[in-house]
Amino acid sequence: MQAVEFEADVKGKTIKVPDMLSGLADKHVKIILLFNDSPAKAKSPRRKFSAVGINTKNFKFNRAELYER
């Protein structure tokens, strides 16, 4: 048994087999379909973090106080 992989669009209930596989005409083949349930969600990644602006111009950092906690 040989395996061949290709992508195709389903039109109605038909999948067009590429011309390079024309030798498969009138032969028995096993078809395995792989598809995404929701391709729109797969293409748009979700943002988890956003930028935060903090003004630290007059901030006094006390390292000793930090280590006390």
Image (cartoon, rainbow, N blue to C red):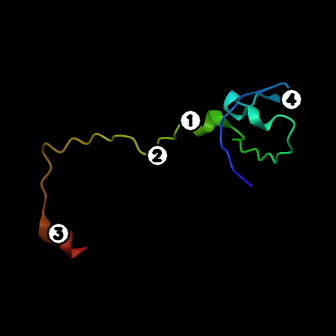
Location of the N terminus (image quadrant): bottom right
* Residue at 71% across, 41% down: 35
Label 2 element class: loop
- Alpha carbon separation for disc pair 4 and 1: 25 Å
Give the label, 1 or 3, closer to the camera.
1
Residue under label 2: 48
Return the mark for residue 43: 1
Q: Are marks 2 and 1 in contact (CB under 8 Å)?
A: no
Give coordinates of residue 7: x percent, y percent: 66, 35
Task: Tell me the kind of residue under disc 4.
Answer: Lys
Return the mark for residue 13: 4
Left or right, 43 with reference to 49: right
Left or right, 30 with reference to 3: right
Left or right, 63 with reference to 14: left
Q: Quadrant of residue 5?
A: top right
- Alpha carbon separation for disc pair 3 and 4: 71 Å
Task: Tell me the kind of residue under disc 1.
Answer: Lys
* Residue at 75% across, 35% down: 23
Give the label, 4 or 1, closer to the camera.
4
Q: Are marks 2 and 3 in contact (CB under 8 Å)?
A: no
Mark 4 is surrounded, within 10 Å at the Cα level, by few (under 14), some (14 to 19) or many (20 or more) other residues, namely few
Residue under label 3: 65
Task: Tell me the kind of residue under disc 3.
Answer: Glu
Q: Are marks 2 and 4 in contact (CB under 8 Å)?
A: no
Label 1 element class: helix
Position of residue 12 relative to residue 55, above or below, is: above
